[in-house]
Image (spheres, rainbow, N blue to C red):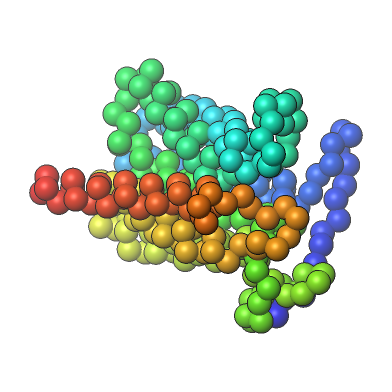
Amino acid sequence: MIPYFTFPTFEVLNQTVSSFGILVTIGLFFGHKAMLTQARRQGLPQKICYDLVFYTIIAGFIGAHLFHGFFYEKPFSWRKIFLTFHGLSSMGGFIGGWLGGYVFLRIKDQPVLRYADVSLWALVIGMFWGRLGCFSVHDHPGKLTNFFLGVTFPGGARHDLGLYEALFLLFLILWLKAVTWKKNKPLLVTQTILIGYGVFRFAFDFLRATDLQHADARYWGLTPAQYVGIGWIVIGFVMVRFRRLNH
């Protein structure tokens, strides 16, 4: 099993800096770089892509905060949502980022679907580093386990969902790079990510802890992320069906 560990924090300009923040920042950098590189290969305008990253990130963080406040914070409080910060939801970030990117591209009169593959490619790369950040602070403890990748949390070994998702995203990145991009089929990358990540989140959220004080909220037995994951899977298969009908 993996020993429980922590990284020290430090102060910069009166702000606490943690390993999570550092790894998220690294993820933003590499995600941005990956998007611009792939966009250049796809013949997409660099200025539009550069601005798209900026607005998507801003909208993504807003969406992540609001989704967490609405669906994960118990009891619900408008004050918690608008006046305090308690956490971020990755699924909320995806939704917010998508809405922000969609609005930006429509304003710029750009074909939205042409940017889908490069945008989600950047997302999974950024998310890989972000989930390493989650693992570094053990943000997502799971159920008690004797699995060899379990982490020896105080009180007993548990699944660490940050680690599991980072490993899955690494596999997904390697698969996309080695197989999917080489097929050069529009929206195939998008479909692969939507279905693959949707299935992963739906399945692995069943491993999240239910016996801890700050365990994830559940609605009819499922986490909010699982419902979004179902939506991703449905959208992905609809896109597959649509692509087949048009070929």
Quarter in which the N terminus is drawn: bottom right
Q: How many discs mark residues in the rendered view?
A: 0
Q: Residue at x 73, y 75 (%)?
A: 157
- Foreground of the two, 24 or 197: 197
Task: Classify 33 as above or below 137.
Answer: above
Residue 146 x %, y %? 66, 81
Residue 40 x %, y %? 38, 40
Residue 16, quarter of picture: top right
124 vs 142, left or right, is left
123 vs 86, left or right, is left
Q: Is residue 54 visible?
A: no
Residue 151, quarter of picture: bottom right
235 vs 71, left or right, is left
47 vs 4, left or right, is left
Q: Is residue 92 visible?
A: yes
Residue 195, quarter of picture: bottom left
Residue 99 x %, y %? 44, 30
